[in-house]
Image: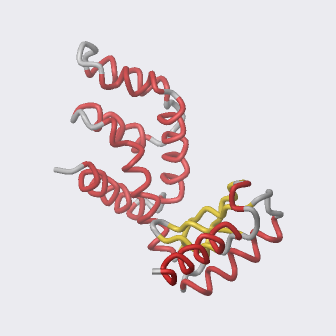
């Protein structure tokens, strides 16, 4: 079974559990913390995947590292350790967030610009793109990228809205090259 399919199934179960317990937002926030820990501490994943460390020590370690988090969040991590699927954790969390966003009509995206955008500019972009794509809300994170020269480029999942100067120059170049043939 592919990693994406496995991650999606775990995420769907967590989504349903969060809805049943009316704790979905808490799950999402706590799993974001877990994802950050998994991405920043590579030794954690190495330890949790190590074949010579028994599962009981791994579970005890999870209890110590993630104490204070919701019991269901910690138990999910323990299940992933037992089933040797701990490396799927970040993907499961991404799918859980996507399920939550879809249910609430929220989209998340990155906006690339030459400089850091102000809060007002971000809010205006969020409002205009929410209307454009038919979502209740769009949450943007700003990525500074001097290579775009000016304008903005917005990436939402697999879709890119390119209003950057470098993007426009590339399109003009392609048009000139294809016109010459």
View extreme (top): residue: 52
Task: Please tell me which residue lies in front, 159 or 176.
Answer: 176
In the rendered image, which quarter is residue 131 located in? bottom right
Task: Please tell me which residue lies in front, 50 or 155.
Answer: 155
Measuring 55% from the left and 42% from the top, which residue is drawn there? Answer: 33
Measuring 55% from the left and 83% from the top, which residue is drawn there? Answer: 133
In the rendered image, which quarter is residue 163 located in? bottom right
View extreme (left): residue: 1
Tell me how the rendering is colored: secondary structure
Against 145, is 19 above or below? below
User: Seen in the image, is 129 located left or right of residue 44?
Assistant: right
Measuring 83% from the left and 63% from the top, which residue is drawn there? Answer: 118
Against 23, is 181 above or below? below
Locate residue 69, reporting x and y percent.
51, 39
Locate residue 130, reporting x and y percent.
61, 80
Measuring 53% from the left and 70% from the top, which residue is drawn there? Answer: 160
Locate residue 104, reporting x and y percent.
51, 74
Against 10, is 87 above or below? above
- Tell me the quarter of the image containing the C terminus: bottom left
Locate residue 66, reporting x and y percent.
49, 31
In the rendered image, which quarter is residue 40 located in? top right
**Tag count:** 0
Task: Please tell me which residue lies in front, 171 or 105.
Answer: 171
User: Seen in the image, is 130 located left or right of residue 14?
Assistant: right
User: Seen in the image, is 132 located left or right of residue 103?
Assistant: right
């Amino acid at each position: 079974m592919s990693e994406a399919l496995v991650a999606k199934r775990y995420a769907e179960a967590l989504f349903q559990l969060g809805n049943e317990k009316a704790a979905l937002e808490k799950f999402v926030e706590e799993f974001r913390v877990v994802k950050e820990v998994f991405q920043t501490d590579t030794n954690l994943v190495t330890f949790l995947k190590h074949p010579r460390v028994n599962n009981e020590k791994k579970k005890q370690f999870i209890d110590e590292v993630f104490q204070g988090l919701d019991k269901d969040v910690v138990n999910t991590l323990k299940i992933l350790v037992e089933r040797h699927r701990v490396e799927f954790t970040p993907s499961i969390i991404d799918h859980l967030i996507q399920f939550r966003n879809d249910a609430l009509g929220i989209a998340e995206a990155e906006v690339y610009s030459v400089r850091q955008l102000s809060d007002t500019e971000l809010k205006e972009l969020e409002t205009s793109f929410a209307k454009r794509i038919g979502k209740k809300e769009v949450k943007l994170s700003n990525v500074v990228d001097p290579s775009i020269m000016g304008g903005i480029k917005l990436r939402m999942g697999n879709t890119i809205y390119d209003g950057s100067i470098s993007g426009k120059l590339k399109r003009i170049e392609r048009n000139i090259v294809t016109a010459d043939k």
